[in-house]
Amino acid sequence: MFRPMRDPGAPAAAPLRFTFDGAPMTARAGDTVAAALLANGVSVNRHTPVSGAPRGAYCMMGVCFECLVVIDGVGNRQGCLVPLEEGMRIETQRGPRQAEALSQEIGA
Amino acid sequence: MNRVTDVSALKEQYDLVVVGAGPAGLSAAATAAELGLSVLLADENPAPGGQIYRAVTTTPVQRREVLGEDYWRGQPIVQRFERSAADYAARTTVWTVGRTELMSGGEGFEVGVSADGQARLIDARHVILATGALERPMPIPGWTLPGVMTAGAAQIALKSAGIVPDGRVVLAGCGPLLYLLASQLQSAGANIVAVLDTTERGNALAAAGALPDFLLSPYLAKGLKLMLAARRKLRFVGGVTGLRAEGEGRVKQVVVERGSARETIACDMLLLHQGVIPNVNMTSAVGCEQVWDEQGHCWAPKLDAWFGASVPGISIAGDGAGIGGAESAALRGEVAALEAARRVGRIDEADRDRRAASVRATLARAMRGRRFLDVLYRPAKAFLAPKDAATVVCRCEEVTAGQLRETTRKLGVQGPNQMKTFLRCGMGPCQGRLCGPTVTEIIAEERGVAPAEVGYYRLRPPVKPVTLGELANLPKTEAAVKAVCR
Ligand code: FES
């Protein structure tokens, strides 16, 4: 999908480690979740609730909601707005947000 | 600037709340804070700059020529804001702005903010919405396939993460940003196999009338240089009349039509762009009247000379007020902030006018040539209202062009709001941002009327999704608690 641009002047920082659907990956500290996935060759991060079609990040600026993923168990997060953190567990968003996670959140 | 990371650390009330940290929001916040107003600038992104100056303080791209000098002009704008006394809440979503009686007395607004799963309502005497623009949707067959993105998205990935599209890249559409991106991606090392230009041939003639003004404009030198450079080095295909993205599970190729000629180009990524339009979601959800802008072929808020909207106390600055570009956005932010300072009683009318005079003169220069660009790059009908029945228009609810056309015809649908009730278009999480313009266009075409007559989605807060958990945990005022607990 994407690859780092060769820029000798770029500051070299230790990469962050995270997983996507269980697969270990690394990305630059400072990247958003969506950018980190693109840089790791991930093109599909969600399946639509209506037809189950695969989708990937489209606008990278918070308007299209195609970058939805599950982050550390919380569904429907906009990957292009969330900065990557060390050890994040990111998963494909399949269909709508799961009800169990929702009820956990409101303490029902 | 004072960075606020926890919504509970925000003040109860600000003189001015600015939404959006692009050039307009940054300049508005800095100007107002310099005049002594208490200011909060709230923005969704992790760092200031908006989209045009995205990540200008944090970008890993250090070779300055890759993003070009215009990009780095964002630095002094951010620095001025950083020197100001304004509060800055990054990664913060504003989901509602509603009129209210202020606790301190007088009319004002209640602004709903949310960060890190915590929501809060704060009061503002004046609000400046600087929520910018978004790329005009370009619904071609196959545009929902993974591997198809907007050109702006690739540019954001480059600016903020220093990554470039891998493999064979095709760019398609029209407008200055498309050519800018082509040259940026090329100097960043991307393998661009073709730039497919959908600009209609007849547009050049129509735009000729606006040429004298354009010749005096700052766009001229920059724009032409970019386009010529890109054209020299890349494969440019002009006169494109049809596009189709194809592939199983992701894009593999793009089918290009030029009149009756057809060509298939294999690719790994397809980047689409056909201009930018004001992002009207927040401005219209808070009740600001929108009008159809014929020149820009889009909806834009109705504004007075100080960028005041139809709701007193709300101003709209930057590209969200109508497309003018980065330079004019910063200047409009300043003008709007001067009026905000007058409204809250910090400066008088004479002072406001004196300060605004030079800003307005520069603004007039910055806006020169806009009409030429608008007319030259007005998107072709075929890309505004797809003819292909199977093309998805509403990406969230997966509603197709064919369904929209048939429903308009058979059920006599008059406008987008009625369409929602039949097809659910515009009711997904993006709240119509990606389908609204196309739905209006298709209904207008089927009814044989102008888009202005068809109207746009009626939008309501919350303009961004906020969880029930966040709402349930909102800090409650004493009055609110008393109202329900007896
Ligand atoms: S990619 Fe469009 S909202 Fe994140």
Image (cartoon, coloured by chain):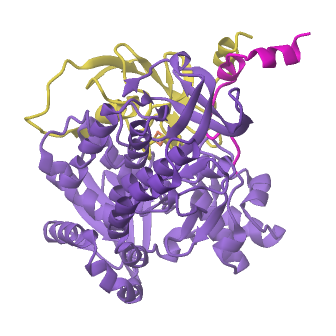
Chain colours: A yellow, B purple
Closer-to-camera residue (B102/B91): B102
How many numbered discs sit on the rendered protein? 0
Closer-to-camera residue (B167/B87): B87
Closer-to-camera residue (A81/B292): B292
Residue B401, by quadrant, is bottom right
Residue B47, by quadrant, is top left
Task: Measuring from the top left, give residue B286's x and y in whole percent.
Answer: 67, 46
Is residue B353 depicted above or below B165 in this figure?
Answer: below
Task: Measuring from the top left, give residue B146's x and y in whole percent.
Answer: 43, 46
Closer-to-camera residue (B323/A26): B323
Quadrant into which the N terminus of chain B falls? top left
Is residue B365 depicted above or below A37 in this figure?
Answer: below
User: Residue placed farthest to the right in the image?
Assistant: B486
Is B417 situated left or right of A67 in this image?
A: right
Is B252 situated left or right of B66 in this image?
A: right
Quadrant into which the C terminus of chain B falls? top right
Task: Measuring from the top left, give residue B419's x and y in whole percent.
Answer: 75, 59
Task: Measuring from the top left, give residue A84's x and y in whole percent.
Answer: 37, 23
Q: Can residue B65 be seen in this view?
A: yes
Is residue A80 depicted above or below A89 in this figure?
Answer: below
Who's the residue at 40% across and 83% down the image? B203
Residue A23 among magenta residues: no
Q: Can residue B143 be seen in this view?
A: no
Residue B483 among magenta residues: yes
Is B220 situated left or right of A87 in this image?
A: left
Who's the residue at 55% across and 66% down the image? B298
Residue B359, by quadrant, is bottom left
Q: What span is in magenta? A: B459-486
